[in-house]
Image (cartoon, coloured by chain):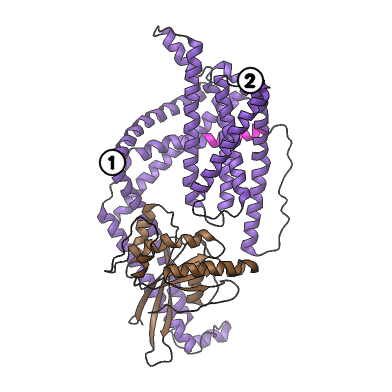
Amino acid sequence: MASLDRVKVLVLGDSGVGKSSLVHLLCQNQVLGNPSWTVGCSVDVRVHDYREGTPEEKTYYIELWDVGGSVGSASSVKSTRAVFYNFVNGIILVHDLTNKKSSQNLYPWSLEALSKDSSPTGIIVSNGDYDREQFAENSVPLLLIGTKFDQIPENKRNDVLTRTAFLSEDFNAEEINLVIEKRYFTRDPSQVRV
Amino acid sequence: MPFFVDSVIMFTSQVLFFGFGWLFFMRQLFKDYEVRQYVVQVVFSVTFAFSCTMFELIIFEILGVLNSTSRYFHWKLNLYVILLVLIFVVPFYIGYFVVSNIRLCKNNSPKNGNLMKIDSPSDHPSRVGVIGVTLMALLSGFGAVNCPYTYMSYFLRNVTDSDILALERRLLQTMDMIVSKKKRIAMTRRQMYQRGEEQNKQTGFWGMIKSVTSSPSGSENLSVIQQEVDALEELSRQLFLETVDLQATKERIEYSKTFQGKYFNFLGYFFSIYCVWKIFMATINIVFDRVGKTDPVTRGIEITVNYLGIQFDVKFWSQHISFILVGIIIVTSIRGLLITLTKFFYAISSSKSSNVIVLVLAQIMGMYFVSSVLLMRMSMPLEYRTIVTEVLGELQFNFYHRWFDVIFLVSALSSILFLYLAHKQAPEKHMTL
């Protein structure tokens, strides 16, 4: 059982965007009834059959590390959070489609996670400002997930989708927009590659 | 004509204060959130603007700026507006946002949001005054004790890098244990599902018999592991918080070695003496049932004139010194309050509750400023007190000062006790590593 290969994926984003609900949905196949604040980091595991049905089928444990907090946290909280960012195979960036600030905050979140990465291709962080070249050399795959799509009124949906398309281009990431509570609704689906 | 000019000056300054409050809200408080309800920002800025206007009127009183009748009029107007805001507007919006938050959480049909109670309008200033003075005394008591405690490096626990590394290692080990247990749960559930046992959660007599004969890796095993996981998760949360605490202490130690740090350390000693003196004075006031009749300015001048024999123009100097003293009190209390509010707000707010918390903070800020005005009477010479007495009417000022002293003493002593216990407990926690 424990001899299966493991894949560590970080789930990052602002407070209240729905990371814990997302992780619960992916791992328990159930909607989280009473979401509460995540203190520190909460991990959940999903067993995944990579390339199911093909001869190269392999079963992996996907560990989803859901790190709580916000970009404006004190530096002591940030240094403590940094212990979770080692040996990461992939990052899921979650933002709330009804809250523009949470999308903008994804830039500092990704910088925080990637600059602490212990991979030898060190990312140079200048002054916290975003620079697209930094992400071009990035070898860690990113997935962008937008939540609470159903809470956006019908007429604004196109604007929101265009905005998130730009965002995912900036990160060189794949994108999924979904609704946690009612139904699972995906656009441009893609899986986290191992 | 002079009334019109005075009104224009007052109005301009109010607009300036409003702008400052607006900027503070945007740049400091809400810099990580999106402002969706502009009404919250407006209410906060209005409260801030009218509170600052009251302070401005006191300064004008001392300096003798503007016509005295127009000053009186503006005092009354300002007081009514701010009482209206603090007693009706802010609580109404707090109730409104709390109800709408609850509604979003529970998806219920909207309830009737009429939470306003109609009070008698006669004794509003006194009620706001009592609450405000209590709040002020609590904050002063805690602040007077906490300030030297945080400034002085004598109290800083010694934290080394190896302590932090050891704690981080423990945290990661705990996370690894959680992960391995969850892997077992996930794999067991998957196997159960593949064998079609997932739906067979049997209950009742026959179910118990059946589960005895079926394979042991049933749901009981899972619930045991789940309980272990819950305990480990709680442990990981505690370890995380402890590590954050240690990191913060380490940063403070590094800060105390800098020049700024040394300066604050020195200030800390100074403030601790001030704090002890204030506690002593409060005790004396209560025990001997004494209310100070003269303010520090006049008393200081009396001392210098009578004992040191220095003769100077009392009227001239008393005005300037009290202006400076009152000005310093006002500026430091506004600045201190805004900084504390910001820290508090960052610590407890989330994207859902940010509106409610800002409104609660606006309420506290308004009450704090109103009671500052009440208590500032004691710091001003007699001739400037009259306007405050006139405007606020029949209030028992002596009662407020006594009440302030009592609450201050209680708050300071319990803060000392609390900090002592917290300080003692912390090193023992780390000794068990």
Image position, residue B128 (x, y; %): 63, 35
Q: Is residue A147 visible?
A: no
Can residue B60 be seen by looking at this rendering?
yes
The chain letter for the residue carrying disc 2 is B
- The magenta stretch spans residue A65: no
Q: What is the count of numbered marks?
A: 2
Please tell me the colour of chain B. Answer: purple
Mark drawn on residue B67? 2
Q: Nearer the viewer, residue B227 or B181?
A: B181
- Among the 4 quarters of the image, the one containing residue B181: bottom left
Write down the region rendered in magenta. Answer: B116-136
Residue at x-position 39% and y-position 46%: B422
Tag 2–tag 1 contact (CB < 8 Å)? no
Between residue B108 and residue B202, name the one nearer to us.
B108
Residue type, mark 2 in image: Asn
In the rendered image, the vertical position of residue B116 relative to residue A92, given as above or below? above
Position of B240 with respect to B200 (left or right) is left
Do pointers 2 and 1 mark residues of a single chain? yes
Please tell me which residue lies in front, B414 or B263.
Answer: B263
Q: Which residue is mark 1?
A: B258
Residue A151: x and y, percent? Answer: 61, 66
Amino acid type of the residue that numbered disc 1 sits on in the rendered structure: Thr
Q: Chain of mark 1?
A: B
Q: Is residue B129 magenta?
A: yes
Residue ID at (49%, 47%): B27
